[in-house]
Image (cartoon, rainbow, N blue to C red):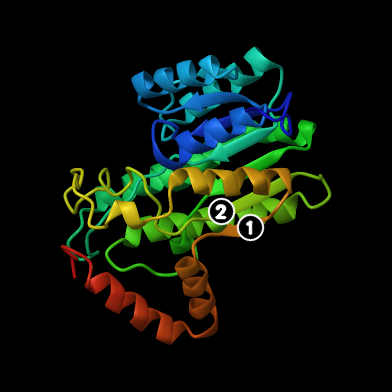
């Protein structure tokens, strides 16, 4: 059943072909928002569009590769042309990697940074004038790794730290403009990101090293994120273990490093 907490609001969600992005798009629609679905996978987001419309919602498909600045500009332009404005931008498109730095090809780190950091920068740059006009929301789906280290994923962690710094500074620059900048730090969540994670040579990992059934469901993450948008929150940290990791990392960094190293070294197929 739809409630109308976000009725007449227009939202863009990147990376909506699966996982957290897909779940956020559905949750926003159920709260009454018109949702623009952005992903490289046109078939999957077209299917999602049909599901949203069949459920009584409004959706628009704009196939987008966020590593391409012109495509990000087009995403914003088509949204405004179709709906007359923009209230919510959810920067969710993401790419991971799994390899030690001394083994990984530098092109892998560049691909991860282009997606996770520059994709957010491009979309936010062209969305910001409309967000300022609507007194709206910019959301960044970061990671617990945006705050802590995570061995075997230097490029991913670097991109999330950069994302955090960018969005937190954007928030401060706009303190007088009444916009919301929300940074979300999910812990391990059920999604496709580990299967599509890049190996040291740039191929997709395919197999996930985690038991996906034991992770926080993407749908639960989506509900928390959308609730955070409605309540105008500035930061959300998810999972008990994730919150603990952030606290220990800030309070006792040397201890956190040892604990994180020990846990990740026990992971199936750990690269170090």
Q: What element carries label 1?
A: strand
SS class, disc 2: strand
Q: Is residue 264 above or below residue 141?
A: below
User: For the point 33% across and 50% down, which residue is it?
Assistant: 96
Report how far apart the C-alphas of labels 1 and 2 lie in the structure: 6 Å
Viewport quadrant of the C terminus: bottom left
The location of residue 17, given as percent across then percent down, is 39, 30
Depth check, front residue: 165 or 194? 194
Question: Which residue matches tag 2?
Answer: 184
Relative image position of residue 51 (x, y in whole percent): 47, 20
Residue where numbered disc 1 is placed:
235
Q: Look at the image and tell me in which quarter the N terminus lies.
A: top right
> Along the horizontal axis of the image, is 32 left or right of 53?
right
Q: Which residue lies most toward the right here?
A: 176
Proximity of marks 1 and 2: CB atoms separated by less than 8 Å: yes
Binning the other alpha carbons within 10 Å of mark 1 as few (below 14), some (14 to 19) or many (20 upward) gives some
Q: Which residue is nearer to you in this view: 184 or 167?
A: 184
Considering every residue shown, the one lying at the far front of the view is 1
> In the rendered picture of this protein, how many numbered marks are placed on residues?
2
Q: Judge left or right: residue 48 versus residue 132.
A: left
Q: Where is residue 135 in the image (x, y as percent from the top left)?
A: 78, 37
Q: In which quarter of the image is residue 223?
A: top right
- Residue 59, given in percent of the width and then of the height, sits at 56, 19
Answer above or below: position of 191 versus 259. above
Residue depicted at 47% across the width and 47% down the height: 117
**Who's the residue at 73% across and 26% down the image?**
7
């Amino acid at each position: 059943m739809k409630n109308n907490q976000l009725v007449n609001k227009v939202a863009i969600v990147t990376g909506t072909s699966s996982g957290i992005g897909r779940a956020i798009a559905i949750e926003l629609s159920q709260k009454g928002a018109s949702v623009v679905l952005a992903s490289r996978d046109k078939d999957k987001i077209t299917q999602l569009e049909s599901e949203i419309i069949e459920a009584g919602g409004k959706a628009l498909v704009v196939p987008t590769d966020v590593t391409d600045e012109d495509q990000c500009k087009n995403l914003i332009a088509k949204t405004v042309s179709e709906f007359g404005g923009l209230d919510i931008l959810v920067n969710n498109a993401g790419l991971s990697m799994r390899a030690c730095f001394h083994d990984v090809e530098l092109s892998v780190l560049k691909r991860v940074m282009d997606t996770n950091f520059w994709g957010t920068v491009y979309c936010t740059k062209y969305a910001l004038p409309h967000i300022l006009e609507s007194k709206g929301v910019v959301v960044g789906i970061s990671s617990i790794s945006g705050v802590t280290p995570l061995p075997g994923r230097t490029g991913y962690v670097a991109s999330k730290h950069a994302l955090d710094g960018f969005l937190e500074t954007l928030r401060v620059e706009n303190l007088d403009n009444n916009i919301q900048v929300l940074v979300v730090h999910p812990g391990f969540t059920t999604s496709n990101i580990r299967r599509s994670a890049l190996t040291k040579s740039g191929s997709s990992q395919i197999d996930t090293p985690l038991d996906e059934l034991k992770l926080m469901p993407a749908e639960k993450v989506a509900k928390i994120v959308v609730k955070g948008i409605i309540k105008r929150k500035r930061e959300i940290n998810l999972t008990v273990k994730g919150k603990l990791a952030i606290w220990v990392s800030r309070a006792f960094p040397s201890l956190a490093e040892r604990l994180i190293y020990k846990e990740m070294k026990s992971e199936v197929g750990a690269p170090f």
